[in-house]
Image (cartoon, coloured by chain):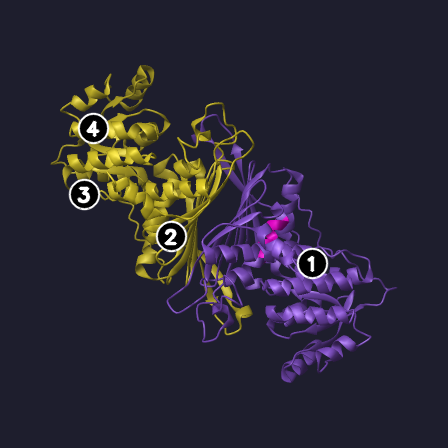
Chain colours: A yellow, B purple
Amino acid sequence: MTGGNPASAQSPVQADAGQPRVRLAAVGLGRWARVMARAYAGSGVLELRSCFSRNPERRRSFAADFGCGEDESLEAVLGRADIDGIVITAPNDQHAPLIEAAASAGKHVYTEKPVAVDLADLRRIRCAVRESGIVFACGHSARRLSGLRAMKHVLDSGDAGRPSMVEAVFGNERGLELKEGDWRADPVQAPGGPLTQLGIHQIDNLQYLLGPARRAVAMGRAPRPGIANHLAVGVLLEFDQSLGYLGCNWLSPGCFTIDMYCSAARFRYELDFSWWSRSAETDAHTGLTRTVISADSSDPDSRVLAADAVPLAPRDHLREEIEEFAGAIRGTAQVEVGLTEALANVAVLQAAARSLAGARPVDVAEIINEIEES
Amino acid sequence: MTGGNPASAQSPVQADAGQPRVRLAAVGLGRWARVMARAYAGSGVLELRSCFSRNPERRRSFAADFGCGEDESLEAVLGRADIDGIVITAPNDQHAPLIEAAASAGKHVYTEKPVAVDLADLRRIRCAVRESGIVFACGHSARRLSGLRAMKHVLDSGDAGRPSMVEAVFGNERGLELKEGDWRADPVQAPGGPLTQLGIHQIDNLQYLLGPARRAVAMGRAPRPGIANHLAVGVLLEFDQSLGYLGCNWLSPGCFTIDMYCSAARFRYELDFSWWSRSAETDAHTGLTRTVISADSSDPDSRVLAADAVPLAPRDHLREEIEEFAGAIRGTAQVEVGLTEALANVAVLQAAARSLAGARPVDVAEIINEIEES
């Protein structure tokens, strides 16, 4: 086992003096729009040309901070000839109408995860993207973290043998002080609570590492009487050859970990959640530890374990992703997480949510069939 | 939060020059009998007086190595007036007849975990122990590890707020090279494979930390076609206030970890499995890390996490447990894990195994009722 890390620090899409930059507009200007804009500011591949939010104050402030124009309506943004695509960071339930409008206007779309939650929304998005032929990318950037790329390389190379189990956990403290009307407490807006907003990242990671999940069973807990939503959720996932576990909560200090158990080694990945929103620095605050049997023996009590750190080259997962989207618009790159992958992730999410509600294992195919019914 | 560790390095039962040592015999002389005997050699509270195995060679060698006598039959051991109790480290399916015989002879019993697997065996053991009134202890020593005592103290003190989830993992490599007829591959002898032999330790730890588990749902994977047993198993457990996850496998280098998510801190416990069988040294090769929000902020992206090590005073979990058993025989100590706790642990194990077989969540009470039916 070499432990070599294939993760290149270089972006897959390079600026090319001969080509103009891809022109984007930001739609939905909340907290994450700013995280995204910081990640791609200064990119040689794309430029932020405009922004839109229904809130004029927020629009003005965003335009000033990121040096772009602003538009007063969605129609105005989508009507501009100098915009190639939009970056959606609006609430999940607004994704479907936004994507339909963009697709009708022939604008390419990058959207935050989950692509949508509601099955009817997923069907609308699927039709709009397929029929228009736009470039479509969904923000599952966590698989681009250097440690994830390294774990995928371990699996693809066979260096650590076969995986039997992968456990992925993502949690933070944001459900500890729920206020009246908080969307986090609403099982319709956020089925399974942190499962929808945090778990979806690890669902993509698990499917990236292990292939499609076939079945889900889940258990959840509300933090106290009067809260209708589960704020701590555990999910077991069946893959063709192995098992997955997904743990997520909004009830404890930030946590993002992956444990991967292979026949010749086990791996623990840990990301310091303090750095989650600074994508250029996240990798520098992560670690991947590999544990192997360093001294084997026929006496099982005499086997000795040893752990070492797998080197990780820092990348910028958000910038890479948006530059890949721009490259795909140019025709020089392929989107890694497009419509198919995004829908497959929500199908697992909804299978887990349905299991939570019905206390039974749910086949992911059951959800996929419902999405494809239209 | 003080992080102080209540774990005393001192054994709860002290030698007393005025009292004779409790006299024990080892029954079943495999690998773990030797691990146990090493742990209590030199104790001032008890002495190993004799041993028995049907294999004369093994008997002779054990007696020579540990300086005790030997008996040629179970009847002979149990008939000795100079033996107070027996330490059973025989295979799980021999526990019931051994315990019945010991109880009939008025000998006290310490037995390795699980107390038994088969429900009919559990009923026999329950009757024998209750009717005879012998002192009965089951070897769930892992809760005596210094890190477990520290985590329990955190919960009891409320220092870290409320727990929402605890994830416990125990695995090793012993199913990687299964031979024909290996008991590990037999779902009757070892339901859920590593669930029975490894998972049972963490089931006790989870119930120790969180109280009784109410419901279990499980998923498992066989390592390859032709193996009838699950060698990687995941279990979700519902507790009154929180969730539990149990992961166990026989397909990866040794691993023993517990992650505990509380509202004001999260904790990760890790034990270096290389030291599992040397109970006097295990604690020195473990770590408990506490992570808290060290700089809070109304901007969720500006919150900063900090991790520190919780100090752990080394103990000897096996020696403490057997000395407590001896103390209970003397009447100067109480058994911490007796019949009730041992049966409750197997009830969770069997609920998980039944869930594995039937692909549905199983109430632990369903199993407890079946055990108590007799």
**Tag 4 and tag 2 share a subunit:** yes
Residue A275 position, x and y percent, is 42, 37
For label 1, the residue is B339
The disc labelled 1 sits on which kind of residue? Answer: Leu
Q: Residue at x 21, y 42 (%)?
A: A13
Residue B336 position, x and y percent, is 71, 55
Q: Is mark 3 on a helix, strand or loop?
A: loop
For label 3, the residue is A333
User: Which labelled disc corresponds to residue A102?
Assistant: 4
Q: Which of B142 and B16 is in front in this view?
A: B142
The answer to if B204 sits in the magenta stretch is: yes
Badge 4: chain ID: A
Crowd around label 2: few <14 · some 14–19 · many ≥20 (10 Å): some
Q: Can you say whether B79 is above or below B286 in the image? A: below
Question: Of label 4 and label 2, which has the lower sequence position?
Answer: 4
Question: Of label 3 and label 4, which has the lower sequence position?
Answer: 4
Q: In this view, does B340 lie to the left or right of A294?
A: right
User: Which labelled disc corresponds to residue A311?
Assistant: 2
Q: Nearer the viewer, mark 3 or mark 4?
A: 4
Q: What's the CA distance linking mark 1 and mark 4? A: 66 Å
